[in-house]
Amino acid sequence: MKTKRHGAVIGLIAAGALLLTACGSDNNAPAGGSAATGTSSTPVECGGKSKLNAEGSTAQKNAIDTFIQAYQQRCPGSDVAYNASGSGAGVKNFNGGQVDFGGSDSPLKADEVTKAAERCQGNPAWHLPLVFGPVAIGYKLEGVTDLVLNGEVTAKIFNGAVKKWNDPAIAALNSGASLPDKDIKVVYRSDESGTTDNFQLYLQAASKGAWTQGAGKQFKGGVGEGKEKSAGVAQAAGSVDGAITYVELSSAQDNKLSMARIDTGSGPVELTTETVGKAIDGATVKGSGNDIVLDLNSIYATTASGAYPLLLATYEIVCSKGYDADTAKAVKAFLTVAATDGQAGLADAGYAPVPKPFQDKLLTAIKAIA
């Protein structure tokens, strides 16, 4: 893939707008609307706890840093300590009452929902999606910078059924390419991760039965080398010829990984503005009220021409009620800034700002936190 980072980021802004406009249509939000680039006119009631603690998704680390900078500007003297330990740790420590909110690349499971309600003094936890981005199948293979894969072959690579780069299954998708007789070196996330969960859900939906390992935040392929966090897997894949991994776009770009085009059944699809937007155009919301949980299953299995099917949404997991007064005030202030002013810096960090209609929905939920 030869797309430059700037172009990809600009593309993701438009793609994010398409995604969230589509989501908003399932929640009685107005259709259309431009991307939210930050609005300092939005009232922010600063105060409360001077330093919030949060933990979770590594995929959103740079976005959270951007949010914190905006928060410090709007609310001088206020801060957030965010530990990018992975979605699994973020959910676990939020549910354990160790942090004020958690970051996760996938929604809470049933048992986690119950534990979160207990942590929130008997009140439900809400999912607030503030960060969006596609997942790249990143690889490093000398002499090969234009690789095509599909769900079935990708599943077979990551569960060990396809072991060589010149395997006939890969060659059939890359007619005319010179593929080396070289071992495929799978690199996967060793820590619990929402990125892993989304990737395995994609394989489950798109592999025509080749992926039987199931989904979840722990990688279940059974082959390869595990590395912690997004930066770890991207760095490992970028340092070894023949390596392949799954990682967020920004991490793939930072480590100069090539990115596979994905054939969903209607021809190879590159990760671009148009292809991401087309894939996510049909996204729906399965959460109710202020619990904004997205349903991405239909995207993973898409066969639409020109649709790139691999993406994730990152949620901030918060208590709807149950905080003490100081914590509630600070959480609401931070999230308000993150949904408004903080969105202005996301393009430079490699993410997609939310559009205005969905920004309004987020603000409605944030205002309702108690």
Image (cartoon, helix red, strand yellow):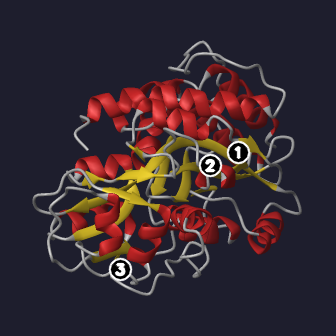
Q: What residue is at 74 percent from the left and 30 percent from the top?
A: 24
The one of 322 and 225 positioned closer to us in this rendering: 225
Judged left or right of residue 56, residue 6 is left
Question: Of residues 177 and 118, which is closer to you in this image?
Answer: 177
Of residue 227 and residue 259, the one placed in the foreground of this image is 259
Residue labelled with disc 1: 326
Residue 92: x %, y % from top left: 63, 72
- The residues tagged by marks 3 and 1 sit, at their Cα atoms, a distance apart of 54 Å
Indicate the quadrant containing the N terminus: top left, top right, bottom left or bottom right.
top left
Q: Amino acid at mark 1?
A: Asp
Q: Secondary structure at mark 3?
A: loop
Left or right: 236, with 120 as reference point = left
Q: Residue at x 57, y 57 (%)?
A: 105
Left or right, 241 with respect to 323, comes to left
Label 1: how many Cα within 10 Å (few below 14, some 14–19, many 20+): few
Q: CA distance from mark 2 to mark 1?
A: 40 Å
For the point 61% across and 77% down, the residue is 214
Whether the residues at callouts 2 and 1 have beta carbons within 8 Å, the answer is: no
Q: Answer with mark 3 or mark 1, whichever residue precedes in sequence.
A: 3
Quarter of the image for the C terminus: give it: top right
Inspect the image, locate mark 3, and give the three-letter code of the amino acid beneath it: Val
Circle on res. 299 = 2
Whether tag 3 and tag 2 are in contact, CB under 8 A, the answer is no
As shown in the figure, which amino acid type bears the numbered disc 2? Answer: Ile
Residue designated by label 3:
162
Q: Earlier in the sequence, mark 2 or mark 1?
A: 2
